[in-house]
Image: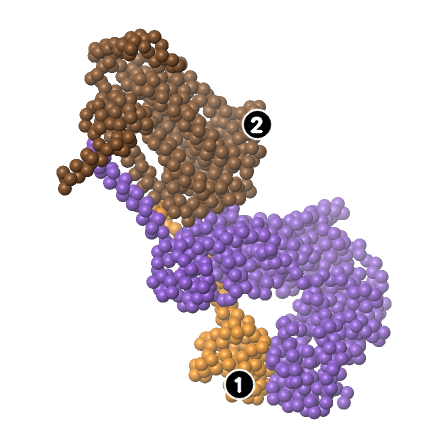
Amino acid sequence: MTRRAAGVVVLAWAFLAGCTEDSQPKRDIVMDVAAAMGEGFDTPASRGGELYSRYCSVCHGATGKGDGFNAFNLNPKPRNFSDTAFVRQLDTTLIREAISRGGRAVGLSGLMPPWRYTLTKRDIDDLVIYVAKLSATE
Amino acid sequence: MKTAICISGVLLFISFLLILQDDFNQQWKQVQQRFATIDENRFYSADGDAYAAEPGVKQIVVSGLDRVDRCTTCHLGVQESKYAHAVAPFTTHPGDMLRIHDPKEFGCTACHLGQGYAVSFETAAHEKLEFWNETMLPRELLQATCGTCHLSEEVPAAPQLTRGRLLIRDKGCSGCHDLNNFFEDTPRGPDLEGIGNKTTPAWLYQWLKNPRAYLKDSRMPAFRLSDHEIVSLMEFLMSLNTKDSPPRLIKEQPSEEGNEDDGGTLVSESRCISCHAIHGRGGKLAPELERVGDKVREEWLANFLRNVHYYQPEKVMLEYNFTDRNALDIAAYVLGEFSEEAYELPDSVEALLPRSESQRKDRIEQGRKLMAKYGCDGCHTISGKRLSPRVGPKLTNIGSRLESTLDFGKMTDVVPTLYNWMYMKVKQPAVFDSTSIMPDFHLTDREALEITLALLGNRELEYSEEYLVRESERSLYRKPAGAFGELFERYSCISCHSIDKYGGDISTAPLTIEGSKVQYEWLKDYLLNPSAIRPLLAERMPRFRMTEREAALMADYIKKVYVSDDIPGFFEYELTSQSADAGRRLFMELGCRSCHIVEKTGGYVGPQLDDVGDRLEAGWLFSWLRSPLTYNAETIHPDYGFSEEQAKQLTAYLMTKRGAQ
Amino acid sequence: MKPFLETWVRRLTAGRVWKSFFRHGPVNTDLNRSLVITSNVALHLHPVKVRRDSVRFWYTIGLGGLSFLLFLVLVITGILLAFYYVPSTTLAYRSIKDIDNVVSYGRILRNMHRWAAHGMVITVVLHMCRVFFTYAFANPREFNWVIGVFLLLSTIGLSFTGYLLPWDQLAYWAITVGTSMASYAPVVGEKIRYVLLGGNVVGQGALIRFYVLHCFVLPAAMIGLLAVHFWRVRKDGGISGPQLVGTPERETVTAFPSKSYGLMAIVPGQDITAERYPEHYVLTWTHLIPKEVLATIIAIAALNLVSVFFNAPLEELADPRVTPNPAKAPWYFLGLQELVHYSALVGGVLLPALTVIGLLCIPYLDTRREATGVWLSRRRLVPNVIFGLFVVSMTVLIIVGTFFRGANWAFVTPW
């Protein structure tokens, strides 16, 4: 009922407002800035990003190309996550397993350590989301 | 008459029907009916939770937070994971926040704001609602309300809030504003007594005009001063030249010129770069030295290097055991190396300079007043004293500021919310009022946003004490006793190393349990002649030029005092060559060399391990391998979940790595 | 079917139980119509017969009755609201929020109470205007006017004390402004305010005082005054009306059995002679009661509709640190506040005092006995113009104060 009354008021207001001035849409600056940051803000992908740059980027590289500064030292070389075709053929379970139990557990390089004792389950979930995204953005 | 009564009777009946249907058709009843249709289990929750069990208005009374929240009347699935993919009001609360903050204890609106009393979308203040001040926070700013209860500086689950608070401390906001007491109120800039001897008017002019022209990461904000004001401040500052008798005075005109080459060697040996960035590389604790040669006077610098703690009572920089000769060499090197061209006053400013002694006095007096007006002493004391109280408004309750009291000036095209106002204000302090004395901090969008978020949570509400999380473990700094304490302060250990979470974070080695970690002999040698453990880091331990006796004393104290009872002091396992061999196999298998150098090959991510047997205690290695996160929550060393046996084998292997052999 | 029903109705109404409730027979004779009135406690407020002039709608516009009806509505809704309301500064606002949000029909109840209260202030004032403009306070009804003035004051007092109870910003500042007007009185002003508020500021002391006044003291006073008011209407020969024309029937009644009933005892009888104008009187049951029923139905239906569609205001929780600009008194005091803006003494002290004293004195100053019971008689041009100007100017001031005053009491246009 109040909505009906409100409707009448809004209509009346709209009419009056229409007579007096054109109200232009206002800027919601903080929301615009947050939106522009997008990834940078607190989303699962951005938490994943923080974890990635902290734990993974030394070997896998800041953008996931497998070109981290420690990569020179590794054989086999770290994975290139920006290779869309490659990442797409992986399913997320494999990525999750590789992160949590290490490369050896999924039949890959043993140089990839297991992180399940270091990171929480949620951390790993966020990382998986982020890694999947790395290929999508390139 | 009868007809009239009948007609109006019908009207009366209809009006009562309207009242009835108004109650029957309440929004929340419709929403709950909708919930019942999408959900086969209707109102029975998975774990037999009583409060969600029946249709009707649901409420959570949180007396400690003075709130009654009826949000769960419509948001029926917040605590049930099975509604993760349900539509709008019914969906599960994202993340695991409700596990930490049980809604039964905390309600909803303490975090999200909005009107908890209400049971309709509009009146719950999901969007701006007339006569209700707590509009629901947008998701982007949600961490703000964490800060209302979490009064400690760092809130791990709210990284934006934490970063915002660290920024508030780092930018020295509390110099001018009364913030919550956990933002330290320590002077951010150097004491200004004696600045007249340290630098030149021309440097001061351009510094006051735009600090970033000299130092691009300057912590000093830009004050939008007129040339007239700058000249007054300059005269006042140049008059502060009484601090001229340090204990170990080098004569004003050194008889012999310093040797720049020797100075250069000393600078690199002393690892100045660990704290001072040079050409963009190096530590961030102390100012960049890029153009310091155009700023300081040579004789002042030489005296400073000999008497650091005389000039700097807060003892941030360590005092090297430099001789007069060393100091002169370094001063000569610094002035020659780190300079581009001398600063000069523009002619227009030259014209403003006082011409007589009385004019100068007026200027100095004006300068003193400007100092107080702009709150310069919020950061810079003069002989350890402040001239004036804080010049900015108190911000301990800024998050409760009513939107109706905000003055947006000419910015009428902005949604008039408190957060927009604060963001614009910190980003560009003069945006609403050109006469504002608040200086420009040149914040990035992200910094401004995070500061806004942190301030938004500063609210003085009548919350019960049990809900407030105050600063806890951070212990305060206490000078260690005895001769060690003297040395500890002299070498400003605390500027780089932390003890019990207090102190600097430049060093990767907190001293809290250092005694349990390293071996005595190694420590003593390291203090005398530090080597690079992590060659990739620019910030390395400087060479203090301390005496052997001092090094022995410090190593002894550290070995005895900074220990953990949880780490075995002596290793109870036998380190057999057998287990060492097993350890080596494990080491190679796990790819430890990806990050550590052993036997001359490996990565640079972790410390090199070729002399680790000389450096670390076996008990420490064992404990660390078992559980690295226990000893350093920030480490990126993976926890491999080693068994006791595996850790023992690895320890045995690593203890065989002795550099001398 | 019909005969069957009639049989049963007859059986029921002829039974002893029915007879014990209702002493009159079917309402189809004038005798029974009279008995309906005299044997019913509520209807007995009315005489059996009333003057034909006084039941004309446009003579009274039903304003007195409407005021009484609204008072009854206020008592009933007020009692229901009082079940939920807590007169404490920490809980009052919350209990109003509860009434609005989760008490069944609570929002409607509060709306009815609020709008009926505003309505009652208006109808009571209009009722007074009607009485003035028809010169109905002429002898012998002077004293009932005086009672009426006290009823007006009680009404405003009830409204004003009720204003504070929601403990929101509107309430808090209206009462702060309203009571500060009282403090403009010389010497005793501050004391009056202190007594009213139970302190120097509006706080818990004021809230509990206003609550007690609103729920107990003023309603009791109101009921007492209403009783006298109605009783005097009967004693003064019903409500006023124009001079009766025609030849009266003279009737002499001999008291039976040559005795008369005095106040405290039976006294020796005397004959009572009355002048009657039978053609000017009509039965209450057939001529007045239906009109009253109709008016009641329409008024309640209207109140229901208003209450469904328009919510009583409830602003933010009262906060002494946040002063709205402008802070306005309740609307009926805005005329005074407007005057206070020019002169605190005039608006805050002189005018209210003179108004009350003036109203009380009117029937004793304005005593020409002519044109009683006639709307706006030309023979009473001067008093009518004076009173009319007063009412109009107060109304204009209230409208100005309500709609045309913005921040810092500056003139604004409401559109």
Name the residue type under label 2. Answer: Lys
* Residue drawn 39% across the image and 29% down it: C395
Name the amino acid type tagged 1.
Answer: Ala
Quadrant where the N terminus of chain B sits is: top left
Tell me the quarter of the picture where residue B213 sits: bottom right
Q: Secondary structure at mark 2?
A: helix
Q: Report crowding for label 1: few under 14, some 14 to 19, many 20 or more residues within 10 A (C-alpha).
A: some
Mark 2 crowdedness (10 Å alpha carbons): few <14, some 14-19, many ≥20: some
Q: Colour of chain B?
A: purple
Q: Which residue is mark 1?
A: A105
Q: Nearer the viewer, residue C269 or C303?
A: C269
Instruction: Judge from the rendering whether residue C169 lies leftward or rightward of residue B549; answer left or right.
Output: left
On the image, the x and y values in percent for residue B129 come to 43, 50
At x 37%, y 22%, the residue is C229
Q: Left or right? Give the position of C267 relative to B154.
A: left
Q: Which residue is mark 2?
A: C191
Which chain does the orange colour mark? A
Whether labels 2 and 1 share one chain: no
Residue B598 x, y percent position in the rendering: 67, 87
Q: Relative to A49, is C9 on the left or the right? A: left
Q: Position of residue B118 (x, y in %)?
A: 43, 51
The one of C368 and B431 positioned closer to us in this rendering: C368
Which colouring convention does the figure follow? by chain
Q: Colour of chain C?
A: brown
Is there any visible trace of residue C64 in the rendered image? yes
Q: Residue at x 45, y 82 (%)?
A: A90
Q: Does residue A2 appear to the left or right of A115 in the view shown?
A: left
